[in-house]
Image (cartoon, grey):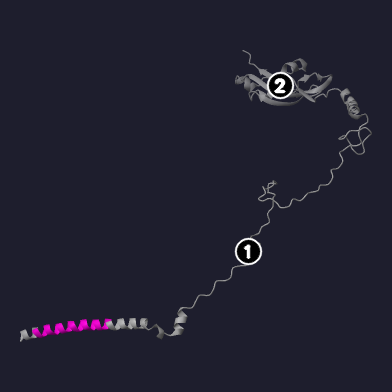
Amino acid sequence: MFADSLLEFGVQRKRKAWATTASFIFNSLAIGLMLIVPLLFTEDLPKGQLLTFLAAPPPPPPPPAAAAVQKAVRQIQTDMLSTGQLRTPTRIPQRVQMIREDEAPPPIGATGGVVGGVPGGIPGGQLGGVIGGIVSSTSSLAPVAKLGPVTPQRVRISQCVTKGLCIHKVEPSYPQLARAARVQGEVVLNAIIDLNGQITNLQLVSGHPMLVPAAIEAVKQWRYRPYLLNGTPVEVETTITVIFTLSS
């Protein structure tokens, strides 16, 4: 009984394999026929659908007019650069226009001059010509030459010269603090002496701070003879040195 069941199972298995193969072949043939038949009989396809598929695209828009493009691209060109120089011409002009300029005005002195004048003279001319003009100009400068050289208002002289002009000299008092600290040395001052020989301005150049006040207070009282330049008294700018020395 077991042997019979095995034989029956083998027979059924073979039948199923043949049925499956036959079904696959039949389905393949049917699908192939469905695809090939429409390709063989294209005249049976609906024409409306074909026209829809094969409709041409709309034409492109027309190009802009050539005149409008030329008008937009055209620019006004000039031969004058921004720096004020002329541009090198790119083409030779067909016509050359003649520029007419106004007549030049007569030279100065040509009209309204004196008899016998020369072109280029001064308006109204000059009697006696060039030589007469030179003589008249030198004669106008003669009063200026008679005035003599101009005297400066202030001159600078050396310290040695001012020592000879000093007529009243006050010795400075030695500061007690500087004496106790054993401080000594020179105080250099820049001074201006007026027309009357008095000190009008003193400026410190160098010196110890303990000695400067006493030196300035003494120099302010000094008097000088007026300094004469070409017989005229003038202000003097000079240097004054005050020496502080401790006695041994």
Mark 2 = which residue?
239
Mark 2, secondary structure of its residue: strand
Q: Which three-letter amino acid code belongs to the residue tagged 2?
A: Thr
Tell me: residue 125, above or below residue 229: below
Query: How far is disc 2 from disc 1 in space, using C-alphas?
Result: 89 Å
Q: Quadrant of the N terminus?
A: bottom left
- For the residue pair 159 and 103, the one nearer the viewer reads as 103
Which residue is rendered at x = 27% and y = 82% of the image?
Answer: 29
Residue numbers of the magenta segment: 7-28
Residue at the image position 27 percent from the left and 81 percent from the top = 28
Q: Which residue is mark 1?
A: 69
Residue 227's mark?
Answer: none
Question: Quick check: 237 above or below 93?
Answer: above
Q: Is residue 93 left or right of residue 147?
A: left
In the rendered image of this protein, does residue 94 appear above or below residue 10?
Answer: above
Q: Is residue 15 magenta?
A: yes
Residue at 17% x, 83% y: name it.
Answer: 16
